[in-house]
Image (spheres, rainbow, N blue to C red):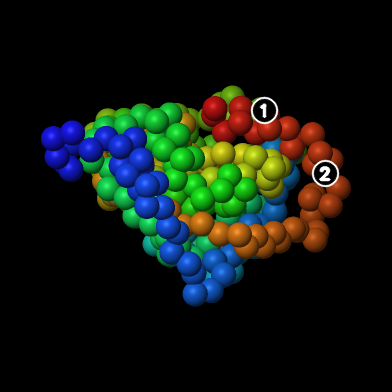
Amino acid sequence: MSGEGELTFAAAVAAHNRDREFRPHDHAHEYYQASLLSAVMQGVYDGKLTIGELLKHGDFGLGTFNALDGEMIVHEGVAYRLTADGKAARASDDDLTPYAAVLPFEPDLSLAVMAPVDKAEFERGLDEIAQSPNLFYAVRFTGRIGHIKYRNVSRQEPPYKPLLEVVKTQAEFELEDVSGTILGFRCPDYAVGIGVPGYHLHFISEDLTTGGHVLNYSLVSGRLEIDHTASLHLELPDSGSFLDTDIAPGAAAADIRSAEGE
C-alpha cells in the first residue's frame, strides 16, 4: 500500500474495524416509521401523516407520497418528491405520506471513500462495519458517483394495484459521473415487512434536480457516514384501508426484495 490516497474501501473498513468504536449518543436516536412496508406492498397508498409532522421526528430518511406519487428523500431536514419524470422538487409541509422512515441524523462514524467501489463491495463493507446485524443503521454517502441506476414510481389511481404490479411499469434512469447523495437505512432481517431487510437507499443529485429509489451504483470518492439506533417507534394508521387490508401476504422477504429492485 503506497499511500492513504490509494486506500481501497475494503482496506479502509479493515483499518476502521481494528479500532472500532461507535460514539455513544447523549440521547436516544429514535428511528421513526409511519406504517409498514408490507402495507405498501399490498396497495395501501393513502395516509394521514403530513410531511410537516414527519419532519418533527427527523431530518434524514425516505418514503413515498399519497397515491404513490413519487419517491421521497429527506435530506438535511428537507423532504423532496422524486417524480416519475426523474425530477426532484421540495415537498410541501401539507403533503401526505402513507409510508416513511426518518431519524435525527448524527453520525457515529465517518469514513473517507478514496477509491472506486461497486454496490456489492460497498454494502459488504457496511455489513462489516455494523456493530450488530440486529440494530437499525442510517447510512449516507456524499460525493462522486461513477454510475447510478434509479427508479421512480408514478401516481396511482384507485383501486390501487399491489406494489409488485406497479413497479413493472416504473420509470428507470441512469447517470454517469454525477455528484450527489445516496442515503437510507439498513434494517435487520427480522424487520421484514416493517421495512426492507438489508439496504433501502434513495439518491438525490448535488444540484437537487433529480433522484429516485436506488437500484444499482458504483462510487468514485466521497464520505460515508453511519448512525445507529436501537430505538424504533412504529406509528400505524388507525383509519382507512390499512384497517381492512390483508397485510400478511406483503411480508414475504423475496417479494419485498423484488419490489425494491433486487
Percent coordinates x, y for residue 238 in the rendering: 80, 61
Q: Is residue 36 visible?
A: yes
Visible residue check, residue 75: no
Tell which circle, 2 or 1, labels the residue nearer the N-terminal end: 2
Closer to the camera in the image, 260 or 187 = 187
* Side (left or right) of 6 relative to 129: left
Foreground of the two, 160 or 51? 51
Specify the quadrant that holds the C terminus: top right
Does the CB distance between marks 2 and 1 fall below 8 Å? no
- Residue 161 horizontal side relative to residue 95, left or right: right
Q: Quadrant of residue 254?
A: top right
Determine the image quadrant of residue 167: top right
Residue 6's label in the rendered image is: none
Q: Secondary structure at mark 2?
A: loop
Q: Judge left or right: residue 74 versus residue 50.
A: left
Q: Nearer the viewer, residue 118 or 165?
A: 118
Circle 2 or circle 1, nearest the eye: 1
Is 5 left or right of 180, judged from the image as shown?
Answer: left
Residue 227 versus residue 191 in the image, above or below: below
